[in-house]
Image (tube, grey):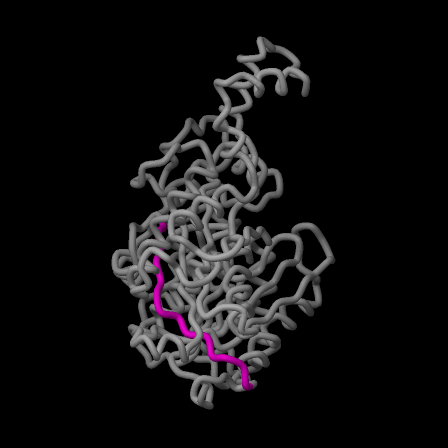
C-alpha cells in the first residue's frame, strides 16, 4: 500500500464508492438532490393513519414504496433495501458484497395494531395479561411475527439479500445511529478486517405511538398548517422537529482496493469523532463539552484543523435545545470563523429521519462535495440572535472540499463525521 493510500495518521484511507438514498422527497440520489437544492419540502399531512386528537399531524413519510404501512421493521427494511441497491449498483460490486453490513435500525417493537390483533386472538378485550398474549402468540396465525419483531431481523434480511460477509451488525444509538454505522465501517477497514463495508441507516417509525411519545417530550413541532413551514432549524421561532423517515446507504472501501479495481471514488471519510454524554436522557450537557469533544475528535481523527471545513451539514433538528447546543459546539471549535462558514439542515425539508438521519446527512454531504452546492435550510425567516451562524437559505454554489456532518442523539450520543473530496495531504 503506497503512502497515497494512507490517511493523515498512516491508516488505510477509506473511500466512498457508492451511495443511495430514500426520503419523503423521492427515491435515489438524483431525485433527492434535485429536490433538496430546489428547496422543495417533503413534509406533509399524515395520510397513513387517522391523526384526530394528535397534537402533531404532519411528517415526512415515504408513501410511494410498497411495504406494510404500520409495521416499522417492514418499512425500515424496504427503505434500506432500496438505498443499498442504489449504493451497491453505483459501486459496481455485484450481489456478493465483499465486506460486512453495519446497519442502524430503530428500536423494534409491536405497534398498537399488532397488539390489538393479539389481544383479540386471545379473547381478551379488557385488561390483557402477559399470559393472554403468550397464548395468542402461540397460535399459527402469528408465526411470522417471531422474525418480524426481533431486533436484528432487518439486518439479517438485508445481509441475505446483498450477500454481505460475516455477522451483520445492528445498532441503535438514537439520532446518531446512521453516523455510528458509518463510523463502525470506517474503523473495520482501518483495522484491516475487511476491504469494504456496507453502512446503512434506516427508519420507518412514523406511527401514532411514536408521535405521542415525542409529543410527551415536547420535542415535536405543533405548527401543522402549512406542513412545509413547520421545521425551522436555527430560527428563533422554532418549536420542535418534524418526524421523517427513509434510509441512506454508503459503500465504503479501502481506497487502495477501490483504485485497484478501477472504482470511481465519490469522496473519502476522513475522520470520525464520538463522545457520550450522561447528563440527561434527552437534554445535552449545558456546557456543550460532549458535543465540542465529538466535533474536535472528528477533526483530529481526520488530521485537519477547523480552518479546513468548508461547510457544516448540521444535525439541525429545529428544537430549541439542539440548535442552541449545536451552534455552541461549532462556535467553540471553529471559532469566529464559524460565523461565516455556511451551515445547512436538510431536516427542514425531509424532517428528522431519526436512526437514518446520520446516514442521510452523510449522503447529502458527499453530494454537496460532488456538485459544489450547499442545499438550503427552509423556514429561516426569523434569525435567532443567540445563534450567530451563516445559515444557508437558498442553494449556494461554492467549492466544497471538506464537510463536517453532525449527529447528536437523545441520551447524549454524539457522532461527527468529516468527508473530503481528496485525501488529507
Q: Is residue 133 left or right of residue 34?
A: right
- Residue at 34%, 60% in the rendered image: 87
Using the image as rendered, state which of residue 234 and residue 289 is in the foreground.
Answer: 289
Q: What secondary structure do most residues of the magenta stretch adopt?
A: strand
Using the image as rendered, state which of residue 356 and residue 339 is in the foreground.
Answer: 356
Figure quadrant of residue 387: bottom right
Q: Is residue 305 above or below residue 275?
A: below
Q: Is residue 185 above or below residue 372?
A: above
* Residue 21 sits inside the magenta stretch: yes
Kindly tell me whether residue 240 is visible in this rendering: yes
Q: Position of residue 61 (x, y in %)?
A: 38, 42
Residue lying at the far right of the rendered structure = 279
- Residue at 48%, 65% in the rendered image: 314
Using the image as rendered, state which of residue 70 and residue 383 is in the foreground.
Answer: 70
* Residue 69 sits inside the magenta stretch: no
What is the span of residues highlighted in magenta in the rendered image?
A: 10-23
Q: Position of residue 420 (x, y in %)?
A: 42, 78
Q: Position of residue 148 (x, y in %)?
A: 49, 34
Q: Is residue 242 left or right of residue 330?
A: left
Kindly tell me whether residue 237 is visible in this rendering: no
Q: Position of residue 269 (x, y in %)?
A: 46, 73
- Residue at 29%, 51% in the rendered image: 27
Figure quadrant of residue 303: bottom right
Q: Is residue 107 left or right of residue 164?
A: right
Amino acid at each position: 500500500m503506497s503512502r497515497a493510500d494512507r490517511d493523515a495518521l498512516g491508516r488505510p484511507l477509506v473511500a466512498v464508492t457508492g451511495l443511495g438514498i430514500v426520503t419523503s422527497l423521492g427515491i435515489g440520489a438524483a431525485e433527492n438532490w434535485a429536490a433538496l437544492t430546489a428547496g422543495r419540502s417533503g413534509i406533509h399531512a399524515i395520510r397513513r393513519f387517522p391523526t384526530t386528537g394528535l397534537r402533531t399531524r404532519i411528517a415526512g413519510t415515504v408513501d410511494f414504496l410498497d411495504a406494510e404501512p404500520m409495521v416499522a421493521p417492514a418499512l425500515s427494511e424496504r427503505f434500506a433495501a432500496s438505498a443499498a441497491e442504489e449504493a451497491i449498483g453505483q459501486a459496481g460490486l455485484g450481489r456478493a458484497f465483499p465486506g460486512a453490513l453495519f446497519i442502524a435500525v430503530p428500536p423494534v417493537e409491536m405497534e398498537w395494531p399488532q397488539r390489538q390483533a393479539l389481544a383479540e386472538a386471545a379473547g381478551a378485550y379488557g385488561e390483557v395479561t402477559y399470559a393472554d398474549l403468550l397464548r395468542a402468540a402461540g397460535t399459527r396465525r402469528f408465526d411470522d411475527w417471531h422474525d418480524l419483531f426481533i431486533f436484528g431481523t432487518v439486518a439479517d434480511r438485508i445481509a441475505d439479500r446483498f450477500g454481505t460477509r460475516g455477522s451483520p451488525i445492528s445498532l441503535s444509538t438514537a439520532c446518531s445511529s446512521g453516523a455510528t454505522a458509518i463510523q463502525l465501517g470506517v474503523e473495520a477497514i482501518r483495522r484491516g478486517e475487511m476491504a469494504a463495508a456496507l453502512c446503512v441507516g434506516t427508519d420507518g417509525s412514523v406511527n401514532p405511538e411514536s408521535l405521542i411519545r415525542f409529543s410527551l417530550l415536547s420535542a415535536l413541532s405543533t405548527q401543522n398548517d402549512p406542513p412545509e413551514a413547520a421545521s425551522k432549524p436555527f430560527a428563533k421561532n422554532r418549536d420542535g422537529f418534524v418526524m421523517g423517515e427513509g434510509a441512506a446507504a454508503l459503500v465504503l472501501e479501502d481506497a487502495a482496493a477501490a483504485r485497484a479495481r478501477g472504482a470511481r471514488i465519490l469522496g473519502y471519510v476522513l475522520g470520525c469523532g464520538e463522545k457520550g454524554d450522561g447528563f440527561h436522557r434527552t437534554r445535552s450537557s449545558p456546557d456543550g463539552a460532549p458535543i465540542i469533544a465529538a466535533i474536535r475528535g472528528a477533526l483530529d481523527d481526520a488530521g485537519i484543523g477547523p480552518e479546513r471545513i468548508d461547510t457544516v451539514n448540521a444535525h439541525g433538528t429545529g428544537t430549541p435545545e439542539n440548535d442552541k447546543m449545536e451552534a455552541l459546539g461549532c462556535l467553540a471549535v471553529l471559532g469566529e470563523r464559524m460565523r461565516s462558514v455556511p451551515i445547512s439542515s436538510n431536516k427542514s425539508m425531509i424532517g428528522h429521519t431519526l436512526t437514518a438521519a446520520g446516514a442521510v446527512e452523510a449522503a447529502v454531504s458527499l453530494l454537496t462535495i460532488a456538485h459544489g452546492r450547499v442545499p438550503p435550510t427552509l423556514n429561516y425567516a426569523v434569525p435567532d440572535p443567540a445563534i450567530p451562524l451563516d445559515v444557508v437559505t437558498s442553494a449556494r454554489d461554492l467549492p466544497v472540499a471538506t464537510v463536517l456532518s453532525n449527529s447528536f442523539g437523545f441520551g447524549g450520543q454524539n457522532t461527527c463525521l468529516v468527508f473530503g473530496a481528496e485525501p488529507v495531504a
